[in-house]
Image: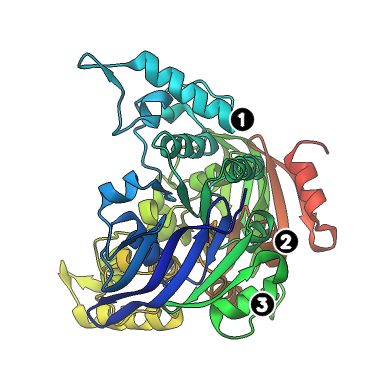
């Protein structure tokens, strides 16, 4: 139940790094028992602000007020003692421990010097019951779906008497059903008086779940609004500082009849029987529920996973890529779903990431041509509009949108004919999304062909020229542009047709 008392306040918080003002006198108050959304483009200051609350960073100046107590900065232990917990996009769980053990990770219950599993199982069961979640607390976390791993993270936070729960992109990897379950839990937490700070790039979720919304831009608080008193377009304008429509404009050219890639009865891990064609200059969408076989199919095509059966034809010639390098050398590149784990070397620079797949093309007799490397990196940094002071910036220090562009740049440098984009805009802000969409149009206008997997229904319908819908490892059906609609996609995805 929302009341007017503030449980957490940031008062004129400033955070300076060498050459960067990350937070500029930000003041926000969070009420007890409210769902308060925090929105803004990547690099707006959301993460920096949250880290001051958890004690991960120390603000340059300003005050943090928790239940009326003032702090110039917090230590992680103090933050936890005051009831602040964060659930990040990357879960902090131990796969080989049970659900109950993960709920009390770092806070184990002991009796006479021994781990008290009986108490941990009973207490974790009580927390899940209060959340309305039916889960076996004895199974290992690795056996859970992503959604139930998310629920385990929430239970872990609540085991420490959390008063303020910060959720950073909590729905990024969830199915639509798991998102509904997440929303129900957030509502239960609100009813119990827990304050939820909800960070998301998905504006429909903001309107669904939040009471108030604060907009950050370039390290400054732009405005805090009652969610019911604003709208999608106003929030976008406040976030980017200009009017920006969520545009899904079609490319300037139509696909040709030329078949670039043909898949015939493909099977493999998670894939039973998949057939489809991709035409030159086409953006082909792959729709369906998470786990339906979309990612598994493109992993086989790109050589990242084993093929059990079926045939792959590229420009009319049968191919059998044994690994991603084979596929890239042929002209097929995959931009994977998880850019941080599968797409980037976060500890290396922009230049090193972009150049890495092309090193053999940029050397002679084992000696690298640094002039060629510099020229190529400069070219693709410009083409993809990667925003960074220099190409020597570490990839791990960039926003999600710029990281996604680096992964795209390194494969475009290999000049593929087919680019596979698996969740191309997951976890990036509305401005960066528009840039990615514009790049996609430019690619197909230049004669490239794109396969796009997206769990964002608006994006799938808006950017695809044609959609293949997957269900239970099979291509369940095809939708042409005049047949597009959410019900049509969900009907095929659910196996109802």
Which residue occupies the foreground of this view, 149 or 377? 149
Kindly identify the residue that appears in the image at 66 percent across and 65 percent down: 227
The residue sitting at 57% across, 29% down in the picture is 130
The percent position of residue 307, horizontal first and vertical second, equals: 50, 37
Taking the image as drawn, is residue 247 in sight?
Answer: no
At mark 2, the secondary structure is: helix
Res. 202 image quadrant: bottom right
Q: Is 121 drawn above or below residue 435 in the view shown?
A: above
Q: Earlier in the sequence, mark 1 or mark 2?
A: 1
Q: Which residue is mark 2?
A: 461
* Residue positioned 66% across, 73% down in the render: 246
The residue beneath circle 1 is 132
Q: CA distance from mark 2 to mark 3?
A: 23 Å
Image spot of residue 260 (x, y percent)? 61, 61
What residue is disc 3 on?
A: 234
In the displayed structure image, the side of residue 83 where residue 289 appears, left or right: right
Q: Residue at x 20, y 78 (%)?
A: 370
Task: Quote the CA–CA distance across marks 1 and 3.
Answer: 35 Å
Measured in 3D between alpha carbons, the distance from the residue under mark 1 to the one under mark 2, in whole angstroms, is: 34 Å
Q: Secondary structure at mark 3?
A: helix
């Amino acid at each position: 139940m929302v009341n007017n008392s503030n449980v957490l306040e940031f008062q004129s918080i400033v955070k300076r790094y060498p050459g960067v003002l990350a937070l500029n006198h930000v003041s926000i108050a969070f009420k007890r028992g409210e769902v308060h959304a925090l929105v803004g483009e990547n690099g707006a200051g959301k993460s920096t602000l949250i880290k001051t609350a958890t004690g991960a960073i120390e603000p340059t100046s300003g005050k943090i007020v928790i239940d009326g107590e003032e702090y110039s900065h917090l230590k992680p232990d103090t933050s936890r003692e005051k009831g602040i917990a964060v659930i990040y996009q990357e879960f902090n769980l131990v796969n080989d421990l049970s659900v109950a053990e993960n709920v009390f990770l770092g806070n184990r219950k002991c009796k006479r010097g021994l781990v008290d599993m009986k108490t941990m199982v009973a207490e974790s069961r009580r927390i899940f019951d209060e959340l309305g979640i039916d889960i076996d607390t004895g199974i290992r976390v690795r056996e859970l779906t992503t959604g139930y791993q998310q629920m385990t993270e929430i239970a872990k936070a609540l085991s420490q008497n959390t008063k303020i729960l910060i959720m950073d992109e909590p729905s990024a990897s969830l199915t639509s059903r798991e998102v509904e379950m997440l929303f129900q839990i957030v509502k239960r937490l609100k009813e119990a008086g827990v304050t939820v700070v909800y960070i998301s790039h998905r504006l429909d979720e903001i309107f669904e779940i939040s009471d108030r919304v604060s907009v950050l831009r370039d390290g400054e608080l732009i405005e805090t609004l009652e969610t019911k008193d604003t709208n999608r377009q106003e929030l976008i304008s406040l976030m980017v500082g200009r009017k920006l429509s969520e545009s899904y404009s079609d490319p300037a050219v139509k696909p040709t009849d030329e078949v670039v890639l043909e898949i015939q009865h493909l099977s493999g891990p998670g894939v039973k029987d998949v057939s489809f064609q991709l035409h030159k200059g086409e953006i082909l969408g792959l729709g369906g529920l998470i786990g339906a076989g979309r990612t598994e199919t493109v992993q086989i095509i790109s050589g990242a996973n084993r093929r059990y059966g079926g045939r792959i034809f590229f420009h009319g010639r049968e191919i059998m890529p044994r690994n991603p390098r084979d596929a890239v050398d042929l002209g097929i590149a995959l931009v994977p779903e998880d850019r941080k784990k599968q797409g980037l070397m976060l500890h290396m620079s922009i230049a090193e990431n972009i150049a890495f797949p092309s090193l053999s093309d940029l050397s002679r007799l084992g000696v690298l041509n640094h002039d060629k490397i510099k020229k190529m990196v400069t070219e693709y940094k410009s083409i993809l509009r990667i925003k960074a002071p220099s190409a020597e910036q570490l990839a791990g220090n960039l926003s999600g949108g710029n990281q996604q562009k680096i992964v795209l740049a390194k494969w475009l440098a290999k000049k593929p004919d087919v680019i596979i984009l698996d969740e191309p805009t997951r976890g990036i802000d509305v401005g960066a999304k528009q840039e990615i969409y514009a790049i996609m149009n430019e690619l197909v206008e230049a004669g490239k062909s794109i396969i796009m997997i997206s769990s964002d229904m608006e994006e799938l319908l808006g950017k695809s020229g044609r959609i293949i819908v997957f269900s239970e490892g099979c291509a369940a059906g095809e939708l042409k542009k005049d047949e597009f609609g959410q019900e049509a996609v969900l009907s095929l995805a659910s196996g109802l047709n």
